[in-house]
Structures are given as structure tokens and as C-alpha cells.
Image: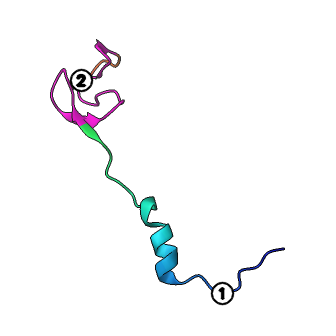
Amino acid sequence: MAVPKRRTSKARKRKRRSHMSRTAPTVAPCSQCGTSRPTHVVCPNCGFYMGRTLVEADDE
């Protein structure tokens, strides 16, 4: 079984993992009401998605 001859340094390890950083979720305005919402998600304010209303909004 292959075993590493030298310990991997912190710098080398962190360089390798540099692309694993978290990114902020993409947010876009709703075409119906204009509130910001994540892309490919039903609008939490008006229930609009892909050109139609999928969820009826509760007006309390």
C-alpha cells in the first residue's frame, strides 16, 4: 500500500482546497412582485414561478 513519504504542508493543502470556498446564493428579483428571491425557487412573497402562480399567498 502506498504511503506518503513527507507530510503535506498547510500551504500545499490550502492551495489544493482553494476552489472549495463557499459562495453566496444567487438572488434575482421576482418578475411578478419584484422582491429578491433565490433563482429557480417559488417566490415566497407572491407564490409566482415560471410564468404562473403556484402557491396562493396568505393575506392575514
Q: Picture coordinates of residue 30 (x, y %)?
A: 21, 27
Q: Earlier in the sequence, mark 2 or mark 1?
A: 1
Query: Can you give x and y, in whole percent of width and height, for residue 20 in the image?
Result: 45, 60
SS at circle 2: loop
- Does 33 appear above or below 13? above
The kind of residue on which mark 2 rests is: Cys
Q: How many neighbours does mark 2 have within 10 angstroms: few (below 14), some (14-19), or many (20 or more)? A: some
Where's the C terminus, which quadrant? top left
Q: Is residue 29 magenta?
A: yes
- How far apart marks 2 and 1 lie (CA) works out to 58 Å
Three-letter amino acid code at the position of disc 1: Arg
**x, y (%) of residue 9?**
54, 84
Q: Which mark is residue 46?
A: 2
* Residue displayed at 29% across by 22% down: 47
Query: Of the numbered discs in the image, which one, if any, rests on residue 45?
Result: none
User: Which residue is denoted by mark 1 in the rendering?
Assistant: 6
Most extreme residue toward the bottom is: 6
Foreground residue, 10 or 33?
10
Q: Which type of secondary structure does the marked residue at label 1 adopt?
A: loop
Q: Which residues are magenta?
A: 28-53
Foreground disc of the pair 2, 1: 1
Q: Nearer the viewer, residue 50 or 43?
A: 50
